[in-house]
């Protein structure tokens, strides 16, 4: 999800896991801010998904509720941007929400979970608050776009 914009950091992270760009089957883009999506085309064999559609080479179509052949659910979480979406991943330890920028903190900012926190980049602050409230109820663990993972419970 969200391969970012720093090519070498991404390649190093893949190499650390023994992977190459051609090993990746799916890429999910939460929203189209450059720090999240610039490198989405680096994965030559992947199908790229967002909250609305998917694309694999010249073939595309409508995104469904789950990533194909997985139990990973696409949760629409608008507010930071209109198309913003997160991924809900069931695990044996609970449901993990990869939330992208539903929640995010600037570097060195105190990480306090507050659904009313102002987001300078939000397209719709009230809708973002609704998305934040919703994901806090459905997830056992949240991985924000910028900041440390946390448990809402």
Image (spheres, helix red, strand yellow):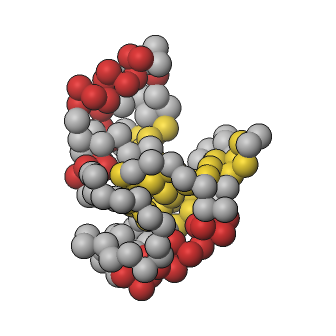
Question: Is 22 positioned to the left or the right of 65 in the image?
Answer: left
Task: Give residue 45's position: percent from left, percent from top.
Answer: 42, 28
Q: Is residue 49 left or right of residue 82?
A: right
**Residue at image location 22% in from the left, 35% down from the top:** 6
Q: How many marks?
A: 0
Q: Quadrant of the C terminus?
A: bottom right
Q: Position of residue 57 (x, y in %)?
A: 37, 39
In this rendering, the answer to whether 117 lies above or below 50 is below
Examine the image and state in which quarter residue 106 appears.
bottom left
| Residue farthest along the top direction in this orientation | 18
Say which residue appears at 36% left-offset and 31% top-offset: 43
**Which image quarter is the N terminus in?**
top left
Considering only vertical position in the picture, is 56 above or below 120? above
115 or 48, nearer to the observer:
115
Name the residue furthest right: 92
Return the x and y of residue 68 as percentages of the image width and height: 62, 44
The outermost residue toward the bottom is 126
Does the image show residue 126?
Answer: yes
Residue 55 visible within the image: no
Q: Toward which corner of the image does residue 126 lie, by quadrant?
A: bottom left
Residue 135 shown left or right of residue 26 in the figure: right
Does 77 sit above or below residue 10? below
Closest to the observer: 9 or 117? 117
- Identify which residue is drawn at 34% across, 70% down: 81
Q: Residue 102, percent across and down?
A: 44, 65
């Amino acid at each position: 999800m969200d391969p970012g914009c720093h090519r070498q950091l991404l390649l190093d992270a893949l190499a650390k896991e023994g992977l190459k760009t051609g090993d990746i089957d799916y890429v999910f883009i939460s929203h189209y801010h450059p720090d999240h999506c610039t490198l989405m085309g680096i994965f030559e064999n992947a199908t790229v998904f967002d909250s609305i559609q998917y694309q694999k080479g010249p073939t595309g179509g409508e995104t469904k509720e789950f990533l194909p052949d997985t139990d990973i659910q696409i949760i629409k979480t608008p507010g930071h941007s209109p198309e913003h979406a997160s991924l809900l991943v069931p695990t044996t330890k609970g449901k993990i929400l990869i939330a992208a920028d539903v929640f995010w903190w600037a570097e060195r900012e105190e990480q306090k979970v507050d659904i009313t926190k102002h987001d300078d980049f939000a397209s719709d602050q009230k809708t973002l608050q609704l998305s934040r409230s919703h994901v806090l109820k459905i997830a056992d663990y949240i991985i924000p776009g910028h900041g440390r993972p946390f448990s809402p419970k």
